[in-house]
Amino acid sequence: NCENRVSQFFVSSDVNRGDAATEKILLRIQKPQANHNGGDIAFGPDGFLYISTGDGGGANDVGIGHATQIGNAQDKTSLHGKILRIDVDHGDPYGIPGDNPFATSNSARREIWAWGFRNPFRFSFDSGRDHHLFAGDVGQNLFEEVDIVEKGGNYGWNIREGASCFDPNQ
């Protein structure tokens, strides 16, 4: 019984502090477990807000609150186990960038930039010319990942852990 929340605040008269009274909730993601939050947000070089989300918690991306058969990270109707990309300057409470992979989809969440993550807890944009997005994704038992995240990429969880096949029954 928990959630991840992305909110907007305006600064107070002290420009080093946010004004709690100005909170505008942009996005709420209900979570079945308290772990696997993801946890990073950053504006990309394109001006859009990127948000990392975990698979919803628990082990193996299965169980209460997880999509049966495929898990939350592979379920494109879920925001769990994803890197999201939104436009906070347009829309109410936000807009969907027109070049998001599922921007016009009726069968997938339009916020999705990439999916198939277990718990992408940190990410960063390369300061070089191409501004690649790198994400650190926590593994289940054997492997941790550092992924170069590309538009529309599927990073494999819970089918794969790193470069290996993953079987939650083993």
Image: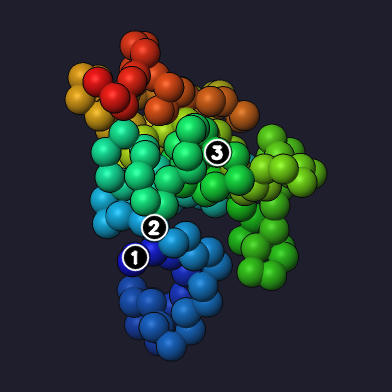
Tell me, yes or no, whether the two marked residues, 1 and 2, touch with CB atoms within 8 Å: yes
Which amino acid type corresponds to the residue marked 3 in the rendered image? Asp
Which amino acid type corresponds to the residue marked 1 in the rendered image? Cys
Image: 140 above or below 30: above
The quadrant the N terminus occupies is bottom left
Residue that numbered label 3 is attached to? 75
State the residue at coordinates (49%, 32%).
Answer: 70
State the residue at coordinates (31%, 26%).
Answer: 168
Tell me, yes or no, whether the two marked residues, 3 and 2, touch with CB atoms within 8 Å: no
Q: Distance between the residues labelled 1 and 2?
A: 5 Å
| Residue 140, image x, y percentages | 25, 29
Quarter location, residue 139: top left
Which amino acid type corresponds to the residue marked 2 in the rendered image? Lys
Mark 3 surroundings within 10 Å by alpha-carbon count, few (fewer than 14), some (14 through 19), many (20 or more): many
Query: Of marks 3 and 2, which one's residue comes earlier in the chain?
Result: 2
Image: 164 above or below 151: above
Query: Of marks 1 and 2, which one's residue comes earlier in the chain?
Result: 1
Q: Which mark is residue 2?
A: 1
